[in-house]
Amino acid sequence: MSLSLPLRLALAATAAGSAAGLFFSGVQSIDSLPLLMSAEHFDLYAHNHSGATLSPRGHLHDSAAHPPADLMLRTLFRFVSDAVIGIGFAMILCAAIFLHNHHTHHPTASAPMGIIWGLAGYLTFYLAPALIYPPRTPATDLLTSHHDISVWKHQLTWLCAALSTGVGLALIAYGDKTKKLTGGLLLLALPVLVSFNSDPLHTMLDQHRVTRLIEVTEQHYRYSAHLSNLLFWLALGVLSAYTTGRAVSDHPTTEPEPEP
């Protein structure tokens, strides 16, 4: 009994997304996670000690920094959550690749095509929102006396930036010349234009005198997040193209004729 095509695509997305998510967790554990834990020491110390101050060299006055709670459990949760998020993004990517292949009459997608889809996903779901609200560590909260970014505002901005970039890329790829030059380019430029006046970390660094250590940690984490997400999306694009091609090629297009 052969599986239906939607089920095959769902299984393909599950395989591609879980593999890319686990790969992403491994990449993050090399650089991003140590930076986050380093920033947590500053944040936890400041919250647990009302009179906490930082020395000019960026060291805590009290060496008893609060350690992260249950590191093994947090690591396991991160691996699981990254795999689930990867599956969700893979569902979108596999569906888009299938529709594109069906529209262009190409049954399979090559690795270079998967890289292109991965770059499109990186621009849509990460880079465009990151231009407005860059990645930040818990140490960022030490740079200001109030939380200037609410959760709903962050999520709404992420959604608007992703929709703007995704629709813009779709218009450039599939629209006519007029739509490419007007709607597509305008939608792509929208997150860039908004980002000029919406970088909270840059604003706080300009308005507050902070230690060099926190500033270097923030910048290092931002670059690390950009690179790790780029590797994630490239891997997800290639894996999604491969698994989608296998799912479509293994699916029978015609019913077998009954034997006489």
Image (tube, rainbow, N blue to C red):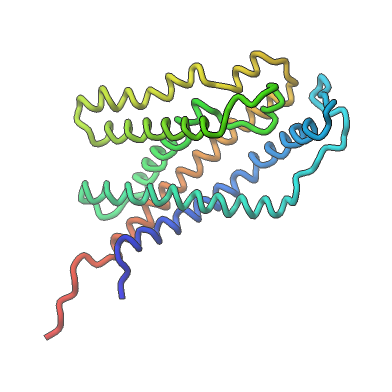
259 is higher (above) or lower (below) than 59: below
Outermost residue on the left side: it is: 260
**Residue closer to the observer: 233 or 79:** 79
Residue name at image x 35 percent, y 63 percent: 7
**Residue closer to the observer: 30 or 112:** 30
Mark count: 0
Residue name at image x 27 percent, y 46 percent: 100
Q: Quadrant of the C terminus?
A: bottom left
Residue name at image x 32 percent, y 31 percent: 168
Outermost residue on the bottom side: it is: 260
Residue 175 relative to residue 227: left or right: left
Residue name at image x 52 percent, y 20 percent: 198
User: Residue 131 at x, y = what percent?
Assistant: 49, 26
177 is higher (above) or lower (below) than 11: above
Outermost residue on the top side: it is: 207
User: Residue 66 at x, y = what percent?
Assistant: 81, 40
Q: Quadrant of the N terminus?
A: bottom left
Residue 54 relative to residue 240: left or right: right
User: Residue 8 at x, y = what percent?
Assistant: 35, 62
